[in-house]
Amino acid sequence: MRCFLFAFVFSLAATTVTAQKPTSRPLAPAAQASIWEKELRQADLDFARQTAARRLEGWMSFFADDASIIHDGQTVTG
């Protein structure tokens, strides 16, 4: 479960970063990694707070309507 959570939050952070407007010059890899780490940590904290406050509804609020997971070897979508 923890691995799934990490993968989900990382993909959310990566999507957020790539949706931003590009700067005039690219950031150094270390600077970009630092930004991603901060965004990933913040997304994880947001996820944890919403899950603690709203339980299942908070947990589910971070998933897209067409999200998929693997449960007992079967892909479950929706």
Image (tube, rainbow, N blue to C red):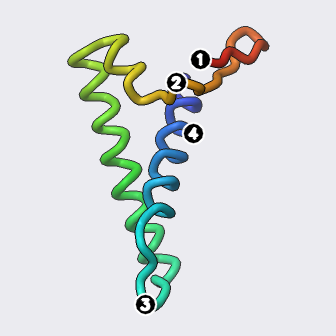
- The reply, left or right, for residue 77 in relation to residue 44 is right
Which residue is labeled 4 in the image?
Answer: 7
Query: Mark 3 belongs to which amino acid?
Result: Ser
Q: Is residue 25 above or below residue 36?
A: below
Where is residue 44 shown, x and y percent of the image? 36, 39
Which disc is residue 65 wearing? 2
Tell me, yes or no, whether the two marked residues, 1 and 2, touch with CB atoms within 8 Å: yes
Separation of residues labelled 1 and 3 (CA atoms):
39 Å
Task: Pick whichever, 21 or 60, lies toward us.
Answer: 21
Going from N to C along the chain, the mark reached first, 1 or 2, is 2
Query: Mark 1 belongs to which amino acid?
Result: Gly
Q: Secondary structure at mark 4?
A: helix
Separation of residues labelled 1 and 4 (CA atoms):
18 Å
Q: Secondary structure at mark 3?
A: loop
Query: Mark 2 belongs to which amino acid?
Result: Asp
Where is residue 74 shown, x and y percent of the image? 77, 13
Q: Quadrant location of the C terminus?
A: top right
Q: Secondary structure at mark 2?
A: loop
Separation of residues labelled 4 and 2 (CA atoms):
18 Å
Q: Secondary structure at mark 1?
A: loop
- Residue, far bottom: 25
| Quadrant in the rendering for residue 38 | bottom left
Going from N to C along the chain, the mark reached first, 4 or 2, is 4
Tell me, yes or no, whether the two marked residues, 1 and 4, touch with CB atoms within 8 Å: no
Tell me, yes or no, whether the two marked residues, 3 and 2, touch with CB atoms within 8 Å: no
Going from N to C along the chain, the mark reached first, 3 or 4, is 4
- The residue sitting at 44% across, 55% down in the picture is 16
- Residue, far right: 73
- Frontmost of labels 3 and 4 is 3
Which residue is labeled 1 in the image?
Answer: 78
Separation of residues labelled 3 and 4 (CA atoms):
30 Å
Which residue is labeled 3 in the image?
Answer: 24
